[in-house]
Image: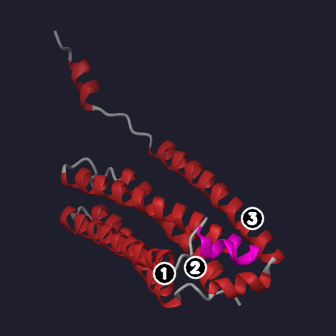
Amino acid sequence: MTTQAQVHSAEHVHRDDLGARLGMWLFLFTELILFGGMFLVYSVYRFSHPQEFHIAAKELNTIVGTFNTMILLTSSLTMVLSIAAIQRDNKKLSIFFQFLTILLAVFFMVNKFFEWSVKFHHGIYPGSETLLNEKSGDILFFGLYYVMTGLHGLHVLVGIVIIAVMMRFTSKGIVTHDNYIKLENTGLYWHLVDIIWIFLFPLFYLIT
């Protein structure tokens, strides 16, 4: 026989928003360590081969890089707006902004795909005969370029999947105006993805 206390216990779901936030910040910290190590390696090699890095960077399309930067900055805004909308209990608007964020992320990946395709078409990729015939600085530059932007792209894809899950959670009423910590943590992850790109963009595209 079910008692009143058991019914109340079943209806009450324990929430630890503080713990969820701390867990997310800890995860973000590990991500910063990962990319921070890569930035350090980049800095060492750039210091060792400044002229070669400068020449190799001219192979990258600054316009495409700038456009992708604008896309990701806009996607951060739409992510913030989605959280603000759910806080005001506007579920449909929140879902709309989450969808826009995904759409912008897809645009970013499409641009990156075509950018990489052009490089591959010209034989500029790790292990290619064209690149192996270049100086060591050029090889290091493009090796770091593919590894770092590729890892960032993987994070973008993961973000797309997570935001899509948040869209479903919002539509099903799991994410609500008084229980939106999952969406908020997703927003933190997405902002990290954008911040990493803000560092990658000048390092590879704007070398002087």
* Disc on res. 41: 3
In the picture, the quarter occupied by the N terminus is top left
The residue nearer to you, when weighing 200 against 12, is: 200
Residue beneath the point at 21% across and 23% down: 7
Q: CA distance from mark 3 to mark 2?
A: 16 Å
The segment highlighted magenta reads: 128-140
In the picture, the quarter occupied by the C terminus is bottom right
Secondary structure of residue under mark 3: helix
Q: Position of residue 183 (x, y in %)?
A: 36, 56
Q: CA distance from mark 1 to mark 2?
A: 7 Å
- Inspect the image, locate mark 1, and give the three-letter code of the amino acid beneath it: Thr
Q: With respect to residue 29, does 74 lie above or below?
A: below
* Disc on res. 69: 1
Q: Residue furthest left?
A: 1
User: Which comes before the other along the chain, label 1 or label 2?
Assistant: 1
User: Which comes before the other along the chain, label 3 or label 2?
Assistant: 3
Displayed quadrant of residue 72: bottom left
